[in-house]
Amino acid sequence: MLGWSCEKEALPDISAPADVNSAIENRSIGGVLSGSGETVLGNVLNNPYALDNINQAYQMLRGSTGNLQPTHYYLKWVPQTGEHIEALEAFEEAYGYEFETQPIHFEVVYEGTENYVDPAIGENGFSPEYGAITAAHFNASAMPAVPFELLEVMHIPQYETRLTFTAFVISGNEAYYEATEGLCHPDCPTWPDCLEDSSLTCEVVPGTALGTIALAGAGSAGTVTSIAPKANFPNYILDDRMGLYGEHEVINAIIPEPIECPPGCIAKLRLNPSAGPFHLEWYCDCDGDPTEGDDDEEEDPEPPAGQVEQCGCFVYENKKKPGGRIILTDTQTGDEGVRRVKVKTTRHHWGFIWRNTDTDDEGCWKINKAYNVRRMKTKVVFKDRVSDRAVIRSFRGARFWNAFLKPVKYTWKLRRNGKNWHALCLRLEDDPEDHTSKQEEGYVAALTNNGMHEYYDNFGIDLPSPGKLRILIHNLDDRLNAAPMFRTIDNEQFGLGDIAGYLLAYQTPFTGLLYTYWELSKPDIFISFGDPDPSDDKRQTVYHEMVHASQYAQVGRDWWTDYVTYIMTRVGSGQPLPYGDGTDPGAGRAELAEGMAESVELYLADLKYGLLHSDGLVNANRYANQAEELEFWLEENNIGFIPEGLFYDLFDENGVNPPIPIAPAAEPMLLGSPNALVDNVSSFTFLDQLSALNPITEDVNGFRTNLWQQSGPQGNTLAGFNQIFQDYGY
């Protein structure tokens, strides 16, 4: 049931985190303290876009009663269930909205690195979400069935004008006023009618005569006095000749012929009293040097018309139109673009309206909306809308449940005194101090996102996709990296007891807190974070789990369900977790699934990192240089029955990468086989091998038969082919 209330918000608990009173040198605009920890809010602010404020401002400017109508409604959503959160996320996606857990109508007294957490929310509850929707959607059929409170009825003008400036002043928000680019101001021939009619702009025809545009005089009742520094006010408000309220009269002025302006500049109209009474002239308003930062123009391709290169990306030459590059800083290879994620922008203060776009494969993005402000919020959302391959969610513990059911988001709160927004080189990088922080979450989400896209696009292995994946990055336990494909198999196939058993197989307790929301957020893939592992180790894990996704696409739901069940039943069996000891029925699936995933994972990691890996002994520990050794998977609780090297040996080009001796030997003698084998087989691609899996292939011997029948001999002999399997103990 929908409900609403016009009651104002009560003040939140503003007790500061422990480090607020410590020596903090970083301060944001207005002297607000900033540092680590949660954001802390202060007093309630008077909303400048409240309908009463806008109509009062209109009356002061026009001298007549304002009757502007609602354009937006500011809501506090009060979700009670996981279904409510999912409904809000779908509403955001469908109409470009953005709802945040931090209310917009409070001052910020401490800008923390972590999101604001409502102190009234219990450990197992959902946070309210705040944001504006259009009047057209309010109580319409598109409205999600989520409880809400109506905080404010608003009129947000399409253009930034003296109307909004006056509303900010009379509401006590002039310190926060920063004009966005607008097409309705006193220099326009349609002023002041464009205050009410957004179809009227500054487009003029030479020879058009301007009529009288007299507004309320400066001495009239209700004059607004501005006490804030005007450095951030737009030129038309600073213009003494026009006054703060547009009281200057222009009579019978003639629009002159327009002028040509250089690229990056905009032709604007202004009064020039020195040339005579009511004389108008065009001038070029230039945003600065549009080629700034282009260091290598001769070698780089030319940007399209109206664009320049910044951060290695083509962006709009108008510096007030935001754009740039979202960058992942890999600990081993450096910077790379974050691929195919959503990017959203809004003004920092009273930012009700968000614009959104998506990055390309280089992490480049741009938004065709000018922001004439000094502070902006830019947010990345880890949802692939370009190729629809995955959505990445996160679990970072209790009181972050909204994020658990929505895509991972990371926000930069930026300041550019020069209003230069088209050169935003924004980085996501490892947090060396806290591997469970919001920063680390964004970094691991970016690594996961890029690893997934590389798997499909960069290496030419052409392994299939099962469709859109739900990936959960988490800090539950660093051993829980797995691909049970819960969501893709079927929401009803596995109950909570089954999922609890699966997590226990990875020695991860399924706490009571998880029960509340797991039914809605069953993931396909788990990726852990919270450890100090370098980027190549984390990315290897992503490659590994992506191979499992391809295996699921090949073998189908029943085969994979049986494999997941096998892992669940290792709990309480007395065997090593999670894969057992290789003796029970079903162990053959582990040999196939995990052995192939290990081979592909390390092969792709070698292609990505080569000698830049983090494992020390640069040549010896490079996977390609161990290709012709007998490789069994040896890790904690894995006794070595999974033949991870077999699948690489079937593929590799023999003799190219001979093993480099290491003492003691990297791989012990297992199952009676020598450490170095005679590998006379090659050219069976990973796609060939995956194709040899089918719904009735349950062990390595069945795989061997299928592979030779479907893809042999490819220049190999049957004797050599069988020999390599015998060397591995089959």
Image (cartoon, rainbow, N blue to C red):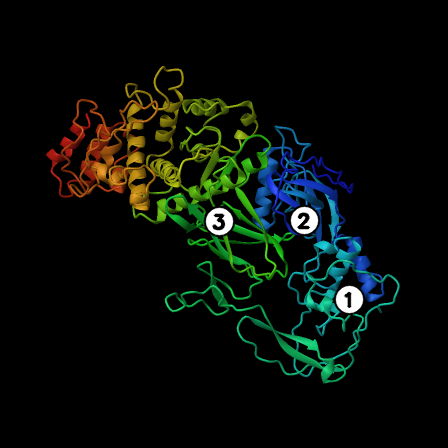
Whichever of labels 3 and 2 marks the residue nearer the N terminus, that label is 2
What quarter of the picture does the C terminus occupy? top left
- Mark 3 and mark 2: Cα distance apart in space: 25 Å
Q: Nearer the viewer, mark 2 or mark 1?
A: 2
Whichever of labels 3 and 1 marks the residue nearer the N terminus, that label is 1
Instruction: Return the residue at label 3.
Output: 427
Q: Is residue 124 visible?
A: yes
Residue 710, position as x, y percentages in the image = 21, 39
Secondary structure, mark 1, is loop
Q: Is residue 30 left or right of residue 671?
A: right
Asked which quadrant contains residue 193, the reply is bottom right
Q: Is residue 695 left or right of residue 370?
A: left
Residue 345, position as x, y percentages in the image = 58, 53
Instruction: Return the residue at label 1.
Output: 244
Q: Are marks 2 and 1 in contact (CB under 8 Å)?
A: no
Residue type (three-letter) at the residue carrying disc 3: Arg
Residue 298, position as x, y percentages in the image = 38, 69
Q: Is residue 380 left or right of residue 246?
A: left
Name the one closer to the observer, 339 or 135.
339
- Mark 3 and mark 1: Cα distance apart in space: 41 Å
Residue 717, position as x, y percentages in the image = 11, 38
Instruction: Return the residue at label 2.
Output: 31
Secondary structure, mark 2, is helix
Q: Nearer the viewer, mark 3 or mark 2?
A: 2
Whichever of labels 2 and 1 marks the residue nearer the N terminus, that label is 2
